[in-house]
Image: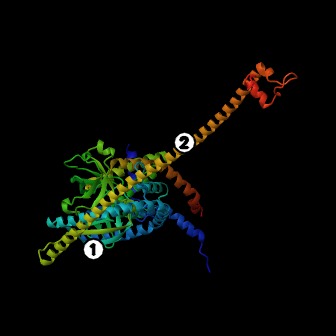
Amino acid sequence: MNKIPQNSIIQNIQKYIPIILLFISVLNEFDFNNLGLIYFSFNFSYILIFYYSLKKSESLGYVYIFIAGLFNDVVVGTPIGISSLMYLILCGVAAYLRNITLSPSLIKDSIFFLITILIINSLLFMYLNFVFDYELNYFNQIINITYTFLLYFLFANLFDFLEKNTLGSRRAG
Amino acid sequence: MEKSRDDFIIALRSAFLKKGTQQRFSLLSLIFFSIIFLILGSFNFKAIDYVKITIKEIIYRSSFIVSGPENFLKNNYLIVNSHLKLYEENKKNVVELNSLRRKNLSQKITILENIKYKKLIDDYFIADNQVVAKVLIDKQSPFLRSIIINKGSKNNIKLGMVVLDEGYLVGKVVEVNFFTSRVLLISDINSKIPVSLQPGDIQAIMSGKDKQEGVLQYVRDKNLSEINEEIQVLTSGAGGLFKSGIPIGTIAIDDEILANNEENKIVNFHKDFSQLKYLKIVSFTKEKISLDKSSKNDFEVMGNVIKNTNEQQETLRILLEQKKIADEIRVKIQSENNFLRNERIRSKKESNFLNNETVRLKNEILNIKKKYQKNKIQDEEIEFLKTNLFYGHMCRKNLINNLYKVGTPEYRKCVLKKGLKK
């Protein structure tokens, strides 16, 4: 009787960690995007999508990102398709940055990330406010963008560490 | 210049059009899909609605399952926490129960009277459809504060139904699927509710704020600071969406905001919207009044009930008055009793003191007397000795006379008489 190769199962799980993280972050009730604190919130999905689209685009397929966006819209209650659009724009910018970058640097990535989230949040804001007549809090949005940008450094290093220590073995195999 | 533009276009094309490894669709096609979803979502085609509802049903259930471990931990934490606070809460509840029991009867009368008057002005709403639902997902979003419940169109849930938790207003149904619905909470910034402030019957519009608070936006007529007690916020029933008199929250008048900012009054909701579990979804309709015999009987029965309850209240009031008087007398007697007891203790102490003083004085007198006696004897002795010096020879026995022997009482007598014979 053949044994199930345990290593391959673990490797498969490791391979899908970014996708699992993305889906948990959009489906779970606990959301970093709205922690209930006045001066602290950040968009974990943006960080995850930008990092993996930039560094390891094969880990996080565009279709998964598109579906995660749909899930996020349904769970949060925003019009279906808006989060997908924002996530995909983020992916596009990350892909463009990857193409034009010869020597990667965290500072450059983060500045690009900041500009991108400013643009996509503005688009989101305009769309929700003007088209769907949602009343939004400007101050909370600014807080969210600021912390998303600042925490990109932390999460980028954390994901780097994870890639090197856990997912690195996958590549070696 | 030309080269850099080419590079830009190549990089952009590569980013948006090229399918990467393990990518089945290009980014641009997915972006188009998203836009198509958005455009179709804004139309109300039946087919699109069904697709949307099906997607939502699947996602709500998935989200409920994914949130399972987190909810399990959260519930356990709450259970442990409530166990730890059990004793304190019990003490508080006993006090509260006693005070509520006292208020209950008069409240019952007010409700019945209210119903009677509302029926008279044809403004009495009754709940015609009530459904109890469980909260499936409570994901707070920065754009929309809403929850998902596990009842949908299959359970006769309709758009605009009122959602209550223990009689307090929570929100209204804004989206209905087959088995699930979305409830827009009153804490949402987009929720605008016509409210009435009591006392004073001030009309206003309440909007949600960031947290568990609402804010009054258009306060009409009176200045709230004139009211010197806690203000109750209720639905006013204006606009016909909610029935009037559903409690929402309170405004604390000692709030600094009240004094400083006249336009934005903070309403503290009765319910904590992060702890919602089971909700009641209700729709209200006006009760039809027909002037037939049965309705007249109903009025009569209600009138009798009000009369009985009023009598009960009167009896209760008299009993309470009697109790109050009895209490006052008891307190007075008790205070008098205490005073007398204190007086008795004080006089007892005083008499003890006087007794002790008498004994002391007696002893002193006795001592003085003894001393006086002693002094007298000494004086007599000194007198005798003095007289003896002068007249001793006239009484002393010697060879030539036959007088008295020294030391005898006769000698002493003789000396004291200065040698004179009888």
- Tell me which amino acid carries mark 1: Asn
For the view shown, which residue lies furthest in the right direction?
Answer: B399
Q: In the image, residue A72 lies at what x, y percent? A: 38, 62
* Label 2: element kind: helix
For the view shown, which residue lies furthest in the bottom direction?
Answer: A1
> Viewer-proximal residue, B272 or A27?
B272
**Residue marked by disc 1:** B156
The quarter of the image holding the N terminus of chain B is top left
Residue plotted at (84% across, 25% down): B402
Q: In the image, residue B155 lies at what x, y percent? A: 30, 75
Q: Is residue A39 left or right of residue B285?
A: right
The quarter of the image holding the C terminus of chain B is top right
The answer to whether tags 1 and 2 share a subunit is yes
Tell me if residue B91 comes above or below residue B11 in the rendering: below
Name which of mark 1 and mark 2 comes first in the sequence: 1
**Residue marked by disc 2:** B354
Q: Quadrant of residue A69?
A: bottom left
* Label 1: element kind: loop
Tell me if residue B223 comes above or below residue A18 in the rendering: above
Q: Is residue B174 visible?
A: no
Q: Is residue B80 left or right of residue A142?
A: right
Q: In the image, residue B360 lies at what x, y percent? A: 61, 39
How is the rendered protein coloured? rainbow
Chain of the residue that carries numbered disc 1 in the rendered image: B
For the view shown, which residue lies furthest in the left direction?
Answer: B291
Chain of the residue that carries numbered disc 2 in the rendered image: B
> Viewer-proximal residue, A71 or B406?
B406
Mark 1 or 2: in front is: 2
> Viewer-proximal residue, B215 or B107?
B107
- Tell me which amino acid carries mark 2: Leu
Q: In the image, residue A87 lies at what x, y percent? A: 39, 57
Residue plotted at (64% across, 37% down): B366
